[in-house]
Amino acid sequence: MTAALAAFRDAYADALRRHLDSPTQAGLAEGYELGRRALVEGVSLLDLTENHFRVVQGAQQPADERDAKLDETALEFLLQTLAALDIATRGFLDGNRRYEQQRSRADDLAGRDAFRTALVESLQDGFFVADSHGTVVEVNSAFGALTGYGAADIPYPLPHPWAMPDSPRYPDLGTEAQRFVIPIQHRDGRIVWLAVSTSALIKPENNEQIFVGTIRDVTAEHDAQARDQAASRLATAVGAATSVVEVLAVGLDELRRTVGAETAVVEVWPSRNTGPEVYVSGDAQYSEQRSNGAPATPVLDNRAQALLDRARRRPGRSLIAIPEGIESSEGIVAPLGETGDAALWLRFAAPRAISAADWTLFSLLIGHLSLAVQRARNFDQARSTSLTLQRAMLGPIELPPRFSVHYEPALPPLEIGGDWYDVVPLRDGTIGIVVGDCVGRGLSAAVVMGQLRTAAKTLLLGGAGPGQLLAELDTVAARIPGAMCTTVCAAVLDPVRGLVRYSSAGHMPPILADVGTPGRLLEGGRAVPLATFDTPRRPEATTALSPGSTLVLFTDGLVEQRGVDIDDSFAKICAVLADTGDRLPREVADAVLSRLRPAAGYDDDVAMVVYRQPPAPLRLDLPATADQLIAVRRSLKAWLAAAAVPHDLASDLVAAANEASSNSIEHAYRDDEQRRVALTAECDTQSVVIVVTDTGTWKPRSADPGHRGRGIDMMRALTEELEIDHTPTGTRVRMSITLPAIKSPVANPLRGTNRQITR
């Protein structure tokens, strides 16, 4: 037994005896303090209780005389002593229990954190945690690899350092848009497209909302989709183009916008005998304005020409960065097509690095543009061949005066069609006209058309009238495979008498317009198409042609259009003819075609014949003063246009008449004479005659007129015949010309032949 234990026993025994002798609260308090002492000195409960019972037994009487009240007092002291030990023990045990629990929980959390960290780091996708304000507070290694911003610089408040200033605003993480794709700027400067997926969580300890999400690099998928969309847009843009000019007009603009270039330039060398043609889209720095105000013509500097000339000699689909050998490029050059006669230059607004995705995109788009150009070239060549063949079969090449013929091929197909016209001068001075339309398209329809046209021309030359001609064609068409249901309108014009006889085999009615009035349909003489029914005779109708009237014959492609009432088309033609009485027949045809042409072009061939009846004579009687010359020139010019005199010939006649009128004004009268000058202009089927008369006496012509007095020489040079008669009553100047035959072009120029494009 130790000294401390012996001292504790003695102290406990003394305190217990005093309390047994005189039980008080002070004694109980002393017992409680002894219990705390036992706890501090490490006295066991066994030693304490044994010592307690020994003291109590020593203080008691024999068992049969034991005092119950003394036992109760002793027990009360023991319990008070043990109270301090019980509280401390329970506290110790609870403390140990809580410690074990906390240590177990800490060990569990540490294990769970280690597992979570390992799990998050094992993800191939980037992982992040953001607080309710959007601040990123945790990321994994994959997130750092995808963005360039790792865990070392956490947190990342809004705006995030990888956000692009000009990109769309981030979707709000608190909205329903929990999955979205955004572009970001990697720390090294690259543009990366990320697919973001987020979820909202509530932290249990403080009910704070947080957002947990993943990111995945979808740049390759985005670039591939963007390339497909860009190629689709370019293919759609050039799909409707049918010439190289149209392809480049829309293709360069689309290409420039797609790749972000400031300027797109194409140079084409069409042949060795002509210089290159330049097409520009975008910045007009290569355009030079002509001094006469004409449209700007693209002009390339020597460096640009050298780059394009070198690029066109490279193998197809090869791309060259300019300048070569450095990371930042101002643009690219590439051959266009496989024939070595075209090259493309794309110039960026500012130098930039070209990535592998950019090269793939450029190659894809330039390849599509090259194919479109080659397709347009093939289309142009086939179309030109088709039109040449069509016009060779159509004829005639030379037309009588005041006629114009026009053939407008349908836009989509390339093959020749079955529409035709013919204008045949006859021996009696009349003129035969035939306009027809065979069923179908292609070579078979052209063969039918050629046979029927030849037969119709032969019948006209043989003296057949319109009704007889169609009756004979019925027999011919019945023997030609594919000729059934051909529609034909035949007419015979008598310009001198001012009459037209016509007959129609199921064809569109001709339209006749008097001067200054809308046209009207000539619906007489109508019957069924060729070789459809046996008809006893083909009807005819006759209509008067007033002076200056316009007659138009055409095929159904002009008026039959999808979604348009044919009566509306007829009304448009009639309205146009009301305002074209002072235009040449060729200009009338252009005006009608322009007014009725659909936005996408005609979907059927159009053949048209326009005839102008000689107008009434022009008669002017004006004061012989210089201020009247303007009125003379204006009136004569309008009359010559109405008489279908070509513009160049009309200019000569106006100049000659102006000289004759000037001579009458300047040389025919004295101051005291009444000044008058008269002008008369007349035309027949072949010639135009202009007569200028006055009542004065011309001054004799000087032997040496000097720099003046050349008016008579000018009149003689500008006209075929010039007669000047001086009489006592005045002077008469007669000028005449023979109207030339109208040259019908072999092939009309293709639409869209403006070779320079500047946007």
Image (cartoon, rainbow, N blue to C red):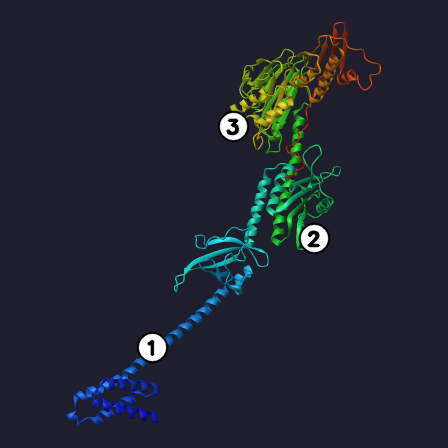
Residue that sits furthest to the right in the current view? 703
Question: Mark 2 is on which residue type?
Answer: Glu
Q: Distance between the residues labelled 1 and 3?
A: 98 Å
Q: How far apart are marks 2 and 3 (CA)?
A: 57 Å
Q: Position of residue 298 (x, y in %)?
A: 69, 39
Measured along the vertical axis of the image, is residue 59 above or below residue 79? below
Q: Position of residue 637 (x, y in %)?
A: 67, 19
Residues at marks 1 and 2 touching, judged by CB atoms closer than 8 Å = no
Question: Mark 3 is on which residue type?
Answer: Val
In the foreground, 52 or 573: 52
The residue where tag 1 is placed is 94
Question: Mark 1 is on which residue type?
Answer: Asp
In the drawing, what numbered circle is on residue 564? Answer: 3
In the foreground, 587 or 33: 33
Residue that sits furthest to the left in the current view? 64
Measured along the vertical axis of the image, is residue 73 above or below residue 750? below
In the drawing, what numbered circle is on residue 143? Answer: none
Task: For label 2, count other residues whose C-alpha is less than 10 Å away and answer few (under 14), some (14-19) or many (20+).
Answer: few
In the drawing, what numbered circle is on residue 324? Answer: 2
Foreground tag (1 vs 2): 1
Q: Residue at x 83, y 14 (%)?
A: 702
